[in-house]
Amino acid sequence: MRADARSNRDQILAAAQVVFQEQGVEVSMKEIADRAGVGVGTLYRRFPDRGALITAAAHAYLSGLADLAATAIRDEEDPWSTLCRFLRECAEMRLGALAAAIEPTLHADIRSDPALTEVRGRIAEQVEDMTARARESGTLRAEVTARDIATLMTLQVFVFPGESYVETARRTMDIVLDGLRAR
C-alpha cells in the first residue's frame, strides 16, 4: 500500500473509532470521512461498506489494546503497577464507550474472524498474566479474576459538564484500584 493510501486508511480508522465512541456505529459514513479529513469516495475505496469499516476499526482497537497491555507489562517494574497502568489507560482511552458501540454489532464476527480471534486471544492471555502476577505478588485481592479485570477495562466514566474527562477517569480508577488492592 502506498504511503498516502496507508495514511488515509489510518486516519479513517482513527476517526471511526472516535466517532463510534461518541455516536455509535450507525453514524453516517460522511461524518467519519469528514472527521478523517478525506472524501467519502476515499473512505469507500478503503472500506467498501459499513461492516468492513466496523471490522477494521475493531481490529485496530483490539490491536492497540494488545499493544497497550504489552507496553505496560514491559515497562512497569512490578505486577501491581502494570495492572494499574493498564486499567488507567483503558479508562483514559474511553475503551468502554468504543467496546459498547462495536461489540454488539460484531459479536459473532469478533468470535469467528481469525484475525480478530487471534488478537482477542492475545489480550486475554495478557490480562490473565497481569492478573495472576498481581495476585501472586500479594497486591491484588485473591478473589479478583481476569474476567473481573476484563470487565473493568471497559468501565465507562460519566463526566459532569465542564469537568475534565481525564481527571474524572483518573479519580474513578484510583477508587476502583483501591478496592482491588489486597489489604
Image (tube, rainbow, N blue to C red):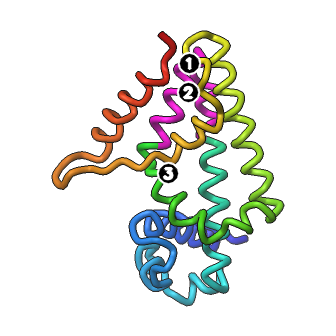
Residue type, numbered disc 1: Leu
Q: CA distance from mark 2 to mark 3?
A: 16 Å
Specify the quadrant of the image occupied by residue 72. top right
Q: Are marks 1 and 3 in contact (CB under 8 Å)?
A: no
The residue at the point 44 percent across, 26 percent down is: 177
Quadrant housing the N terminus: bottom right
Q: How many marks?
A: 3
Residue type, numbered disc 3: Leu
Q: Secondary structure at mark 1?
A: loop
Query: Measured from the top left, where is residue 65 in percent x and y?
Result: 60, 46
Q: CA distance from mark 1 to mark 3?
A: 22 Å
Residue at image mark 1: 140
**Position of 136 relative to 40 (above/below):** above
Q: Are marks 2 and 3 in contact (CB under 8 Å)?
A: no
Residue at image mark 3: 95
- For this orientation, the residue located farthest to the front is 143
Q: Is residue 3 magenta?
A: no
Sequence-first tag of 1 and 3: 3
Q: Main secondary structure of the magenta part?
A: helix
